[in-house]
Every structure is written in C-alpha cells, then in structure tokens.
Image (spheres, rainbow, N blue to C red):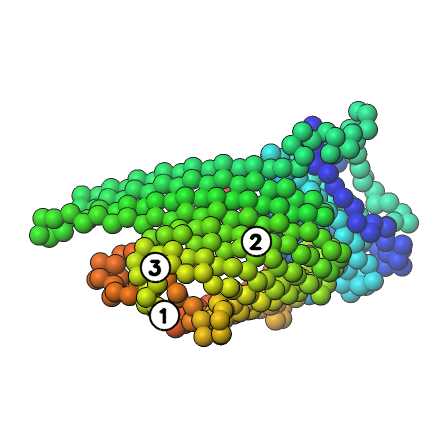
Amino acid sequence: MLFASIVLAGWLLADSAANHPRRGYSSHESGSQQPAQTSARLRVFLDCSGGDCFDDYLREEVRLGEYVRDRTDADVHVLITQAETSAGGDEYTLSFIGLGAFAATARTLKVTTDANEPEDGVRRQLASALTLGLLSYLAPTELPRNLAVTAAIDAGKAAPPVESADPWKRWLFSLNANVNIESEESTSERNWGLSAGADRITPEWKITFGVNVNENREEFDLDDGSRLAVVRKDSAFNWLTVGSLGEHWSAGATGDLSSSTFDNTRLAIDIGPAIEWNFFPYSMYTRRQFRVQYGIGVARRRYYEETLYGKLEETRARQELSATFEQREPWGTLEGRVEASNYFPGLSTHRLEVDGEVDVRITRGLSLNLEAAVSRIRDQLALPRRDASPEEVLLRLRQLQSDFEARLEFGIEYRFGSRFAAIVNPRFGQ
C-alpha cells in the first residue's frame, strides 16, 4: 500500500458551516457517479502556485463540488503550494480559504511525500487531503446521501523514533553524471558534467555540501580549411551550515571554491559567517517570507591571466547584504530580492542587483505577470588586461566588461467564457 504522511494543521470541522445554505454534490459510489442533489453545488477554485499539483487528476477524482476557473465565482479557494523536503521529497500545503458565505471558514492541510514515492501515490494523497478539506464546507449537521468514506491506517506496531530507525542519521546523498554529444558536417560539440551533494536538514540545523565539474568542447571547420577548437571548463565546491535561533533568527557560515575559464579564475575561495532575520515566523514559509541577511568574509583569487588591475592573485574582504520577499496569496504571487555587495577597502568595487516577479489576478479572467531584473556592476576584478579576440566574443569564451545588466518580461492574459472547468479530455494528448 502506498503511504505518505498527511499532517493536519489547525484542523477542526467547520462548526459555522451549519448556518450556511445546504449544497448538493456528486460523489463516487460503487464505481458510478451520483447526480447533484440540488443545483447549488459547492463551487471550488483550484489554484496551484509554484508547482505541479496534478490539478487535472484532482478535478477528475474529487467530485464534491463544481470547479470554476475564477476565484470570484467560488465558495472555497484551494491554494496549493509546494516545497522540497530535505530528503528529496515534496511538502504540499493545501490552504482552504472560504469565500462569500464561507468567508469565516479556513483550514490548512499538509501532505508530505518521500523522494521515491510514485507519482500515482503522490496524487492519491493530494486527492485524499482535498477531499478532507472540502468535506468541512459541506453541512456537517446532516451527512450527504451516498457519501462513502474509507480510511486505511498501518496496523503494525508503533514506528520507532526517526533517529533510531535511520542508519543515515538524516544525511541524504546524490550523484549525477551526464554526457552530451552533437555532430554536424562542419561542427561538433561534446560536453560532460559530474556533480555530487550531501545534505542533512533538521528543524534546528541545515548542512549542505555540493560539488560539480563541467567541460564543454566545440570544434568548427573554417572556410580556409583549418579547424577551430574551443574549450570551456568550470568547477565548484560549496557548503552551507545554518543553525536555528528561534522563529525569526538564523546564523551560519558559507563557503565556495570555484574555477572558471570563462571568468578568468584559476581558483576562487570565499568563506565567511552570515546572519539572517525573517520578519515573519519561519513556519509561515509556504505563504510569506521577508528575510534580511548579512554576511562578511574573505575572498581569495588566483587568475589565469593578468587582470585590468595588474593582478595575478589577490585577497580581499567582502560583505553582502540582501533582502528577499516572497508572498503567495489568493490574489496572486509576489517575489522580490535586493542584494548589495562590495570588496574592501572602500566601496568602489561593488555590485547592486534587484529582481522581482509579480503575478496578479486583477479582475474576473484578467491576470498580469511582470518579471524584471537589473544589476549595477562595478566588481569585475577578474577581467583580463588584454582585449578579447573576435572568437572569444562570438563564442562567449570569456567574460566581457559591463556596467549593467537588465531584463524585463511582461505578460497579460484574459480568459472568458464558461465559468466551469471540471471536464478533462485527454484525447490527442491535448
């Protein structure tokens, strides 16, 4: 039997729902669907934010109401958010937000799956949680006709504590290797990569290690009969240790060792402590976060070629201050980040980066999406002194001097027509 733990947070049946108008529904019974008892069925707006919640499957399997495509037509807004767990699985948070007559009723359920959980097992657990959540919006004083509820619980002995049952002591390891080969008559490309990671994450500690190595080689047949070969190499090792200091504070240290032919960096070492403050409790991470982080440390560099500053190696102090805001609400999502850093001494070598994304439901059927990012760059310490050759520019073999970077994406969508969205038709894969 497929099993994933369902954590019920703040769960009470909707005692206020008894005063709401009675609603009909349809449900599965003995393999057949029952017709709605009345025309006033519970209207549900299913909202997947930042991930795949198998919404087509849920609409097909959970028939306790009528699914609508706009929240303004709904009696209950089901906001589903997704976050990856330390063991490589997923934690889905289902927030049930009552609207209209149900405005005073709100519930939250969580479904946690492991990394090896089959896709069918994941979506079945989500369907169970969605069913439980929607049942609280049906009148509890009189159970709907033909309703059948089945529960399955492991009948074995109580499970031992996680720590004693886990020989890995919560450590999770990953290995990855990839090779890609492409060839045409006059060009060929080969690249390969290796990566490995180790993580141990508990409510009190977060410890991660990662390493990756990549190489890309391209060859071109030129018109004069010669053959041009170019190679790009990069590698990196990084680690992070963070300890909890309560619901708002965290402290830790980070480190990076890297090498890149593109960046003219034979060896780069960055290491230092950092501290973070979250204006909201960390337990609210599925809905909103506002984290401010400050770090200071040492940066050691060795270069392949002499830089614009006449250096083949150098050591400097570096500081970084960042603020990150994330919010997921029924009206949409909002994410933003500001990061400022500089090398000592002085502030002449600095960088400022601002990026954000907003997705807002403006009115019925109308939504707006905006993504923007801009950087002010004054810290390219590794730029070679010599000018880049045409081949290096065209093939992006080395970093070029730049004072800024900017990106802007804008989108608007308007949907109209039937308010209902319950039918799934998989024919022709559409």
> Which residue type does callout 2 highlight?
Thr
Q: Of the residues under marks 2 and 1, which one precedes in the sequence?
A: 2
Q: Residues within 10 Å of mark 1 (few under 14, many from 20)?
A: few
x then y, percent, for residue 398 = 31, 59
**Residue for point 63% across, 42% down:** 200
Q: Is residue 69 left or right of residue 344?
A: right
Foreground mark, 2 or 3, reads: 3
Q: Is residue 313 left or right of residue 59?
A: left
**Residue for point 65% across, 51% down:** 242
**Residue for point 66% across, 65% down:** 290
> Which residue type does callout 3 highlight?
Leu
Q: Of the residues under marks 2 and 3, which one precedes in the sequence?
A: 2
Residue at label 1? 402
x then y, percent, for residue 144 = 83, 45
From mark 1 to mark 3, how far is it between C-alphas?
21 Å
Q: Nearer the viewer, residue 77 or 142?
A: 77
For label 2, the SS is: strand
Residue at label 3? 312
Marks 1,3: beta carbons within 8 A:
no
Residue at label 2? 254
x then y, percent, for residue 360 = 60, 68
Foreground mark, 1 or 3, reads: 3
Q: Of the residues under marks 1 and 3, which one precedes in the sequence?
A: 3
Q: Is residue 181 left or right of residue 94?
A: left
For label 3, the SS is: loop
> Which residue type does callout 1 highlight?
Ser
